[in-house]
Amino acid sequence: MYLISMIIPVYNAEEYLEKTLNSIINQSIGFNNIELILVDDFSTDNSKKIIEEYAETYNNIIPFYSSKNHGQPGFGRNIGLKKATADYIMFMDNDDEIDKDMCKKLYETITGENADVVCCDTHIVDPLGDIKDTIEYTNGIREKDFIIIEGDDIIFFRNNSLWNKIYKKNIIKDNDIKFEETTYADDLIFTSTYFIKSKKLVYLEAYFGYKWKIRTDSLSHAVKKKHIMGLIKAYRHLSIIFKEENKVNLGNTVLRRHAEFLLIQCTYLDENKKETEETLKEVHDYEIENNIRELTGLMNRLNYFILNEHYTIARLFIRIIDRIRRLDILRKINRKI
């Protein structure tokens, strides 16, 4: 019986996949204790061949090959959940790596502390350099080398990333928690739903177990209308979940926090004038619908233009923010903050 089922959706990752797999094989918990489920979403490069070679070598690697591409990782993650046999679930992206002790630390903590979810910090690597990213939380209790967060405070844990955590399979199964397969930000919906169903989260503060590799400079980060629409769809989905759980007021607070992230993503919009202004109108409708009025800093000013339907001015303001973001000295200062 495996201790952990590790699920990785794969698509066109030949350049990075071997390093990702080797970081799992070299885990101090013992690779024989890990069930590695690799779901290839109809890659057009050599990813499938790499998976086949590893699966021939290790009998605890479970491959699945899709006959068509689904475009979002939610499909592969759902397949992985169906195939998982261990009591504990972890996820990775196909181009990242993990510290050799990550599986052991997270597994021993979730079992030893009888937690519903355990999270560690992330080491972000991109062309600008390295960042050690810590997480904000509400009403945490410090104990030993970690933070305990319980009840509704878990919902305010400011990290919805999927892959720096370990989960209980029975919570996923008993509550029928799945990934939205056609929605951008499927991990946001999954983790938020899981948090709602959880009673105890343990945060391994300052243990940077997950190495998240961002392949492009932030200046190359381009957002399309479909991504903004996907986020809005995800937020609306979450509103329904909070309503079903009789946590509407709590949900409103959480979604107001996400509104700032939504507007930050808008500042990376890479569309023509017509598409950009159509996107901003969709943001306007969502914010009116959820009574989102006040934000902070530059995003509050952008929000003012959007709420008052000054879409041309908002588009120009986005261009100004982009110009500011490209100033080298500001970028260096921002990385140090």
Image (cartoon, rainbow, N blue to C red):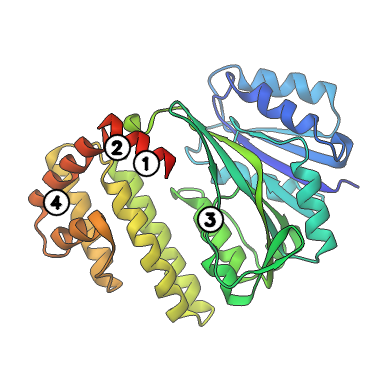
Could you tell me residue 189's position as x and y percent?
Answer: 51, 59
Q: Nearer the viewer, mark 3 or mark 2?
A: 2
Quarter of the figure that contains the C terminus: top left
Q: Which of pointers 3 and 2 lies earlier in the amino acid sequence?
A: 3
Question: Disc 2, disc 1: CB below 8 Å?
Answer: yes
Query: How far, Cα to Cα, is label 2 from label 1?
Result: 6 Å
Residue 180 in sight in this render: no
The amino acid pointed to by label 1 is: Asn
- CA neighbours of label 1 inside 10 A, class few (<14), some (14 to 19), many (20+): few
Element marked by disc 2:
helix
What residue is shown with label 2?
330
Vertical placement of residue 244 versus 46, above or below = below
What residue is shown with label 3?
160
The amino acid pointed to by label 2 is: Leu
What residue is shown with label 4?
314
Vertical placement of residue 236 versus 160, above or below = below
Relative side of 251 to 17, left or right: left
The amino acid pointed to by label 4 is: Ala
Element marked by disc 4:
helix
Could you tell me residue 208's position as x and y percent?
Answer: 64, 43
What residue is shown with label 1?
334
Query: How far, Cα to Cα, is label 1 from label 3?
Result: 22 Å
- CA neighbours of label 3 inside 10 A, class few (<14), some (14 to 19), many (20+): some
Q: Which of pointers 1 and 4 lies earlier in the amino acid sequence?
A: 4
